[in-house]
Image (tube, grey):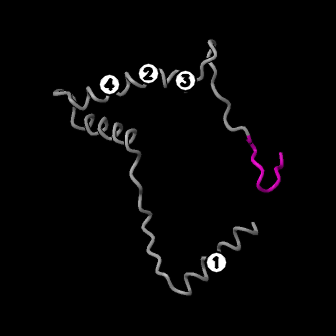
Amino acid sequence: MVFKKGESGNPRGRPKVVLDDGRTLSDLAKEHTARAIETLVNVLGSNVAPEAAKVSAATALLDRGWGRPRQDVGLDVKSDEAVAALLEDARKRARSA
């Protein structure tokens, strides 16, 4: 099947899994949110859980409560005319694509 440029081969995305009772998999997971967070908190405070499990639980809690930390992609761009020209060229190519 051939698609036009810029046209998605799957415009509606992946179909949702719907259970017999009409709930989606996402609905089912959301129903267990409180219990899952309690489990993470219990692992975090456990005296017998491995340290790796505690770190994983802490990371999961922080990511969900505060969002994942921003990641630096390591670009160091100096503002000069050459860089500005390159950026403008890239913008023009993106608009015409």
Q: Is residue 33 magenta?
A: no
How far across and down, in percent of the image, does residue 45 sit? 21, 29
Labelled pair 3, 1 in contact (Cβ < 8 Å): no
Distance between the Cα atoms at labels 3 and 2? Answer: 9 Å
Distance between the Cα atoms at labels 1 and 4? Answer: 51 Å
Quarter where residue 70 is shown: bottom left
Quarter where residue 94 is shown: bottom right
* Image: 65 above or below 2: above
Q: Which numbered circle lies on residue 69?
A: none
Residue highlighted by disc 1: 88
Q: Which numbered circle lies on residue 38?
A: 4
Q: Residues within 10 Å of mark 3 (few under 14, many from 20)?
A: few
Tell me which numbered mark, 1 or 2, is placed earlier along the sequence: 2
Distance between the Cα atoms at labels 4 and 2? Answer: 10 Å
* Image: 31 above or below 63: above
Badge 4 amino acid = Glu
Labelled pair 1, 2 in contact (Cβ < 8 Å): no
Badge 3 amino acid = Asp
What residue is drawn where x is 24% and y is 32%?
44
